[in-house]
Image (cartoon, grey):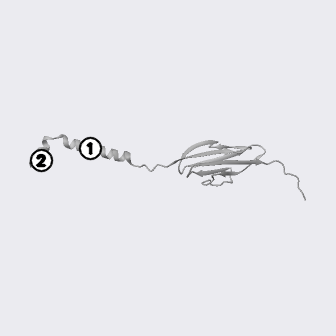
Amino acid sequence: MRMILDLRKHRYVPGVSIFLVMVALTVGIVGCDDGGSEPYTLTIASTAGGSVITPGEGTSTYDEGTVVNLVATADDGYGFEGWTGDTEGVGDPGSRTTTMILSHDSSITANFGPTGPPGPITP
């Protein structure tokens, strides 16, 4: 009984207790790992005869698992020959329009070649 009466003298104790519990919960939430993904760089280049129009050439940073749309276009007199480099994750390395799912730092190149008239036919 005396303990109950002593608690009445200190009316701030329940409020302080609630405050301390809230602080502990907030610190716990802030300290939690959100399971965020690792950022990776993707470097895109092209050979003579064309360019990468989506997402463009150069180096960009993406989160792990991001699906990047890749679109290459050939100049007049050239044709797309394929993607080379770190093509792991590229949906179709032979298609000028494809996607890539990033799982590590990567560097890819869109390759183009001349499509001029056929050369002489030898018997």
Q: Which residue lies at the image location 61% right of the left edge and 51% below the top edge?
A: 99
Secondary structure state at the residue bearing disc 2: helix
- Are there few (<14), some (14-19), or many (20+) residues within 10 Å of tag 1? few
Quadrant of the drawing holding the C terminus: bottom right
Q: Position of residue 14 (x, y in %)?
A: 20, 44
Q: Which residue lies at the image location 77% right of the left edge and 43% below the top edge?
A: 76
For this orientation, the residue located farthest to the bottom is 123
- Are there few (<14), some (14-19), or many (20+) residues within 10 Å of tag 2? few
Front residue of 78 and 30: 30
In the drawing, what numbered circle is on residue 114?
none
Name the amino acid, label 1: Leu
Q: Position of residue 60 (x, y in %)?
A: 58, 43
Of marks 2 and 1, the one in the foreground: 1
Front residue of 39 and 13: 39
User: Which label's residue is closer to the chain start, 2 or 1?
Assistant: 2
Quarter location, residue 73: top right
Q: CA distance from mark 2 to mark 1?
A: 21 Å
For this orientation, the residue located farthest to the right is 123
Front residue of 59 and 56: 59
Given contact means CB atoms under 8 Å apart, are the residues at marks 2 and 1 in contact? no
Residue holding disc 1:
20
Secondary structure state at the residue bearing disc 1: helix
Name the amino acid, label 2: Ile
Whether residue 15 sits left or right of residue 30 in the image: it is left
In the drawing, what numbered circle is on residue 4?
2
Q: Which residue lies at the image location 70% right of the left edge and 52% below the top edge?
A: 82
Quarter location, residue 44: top right
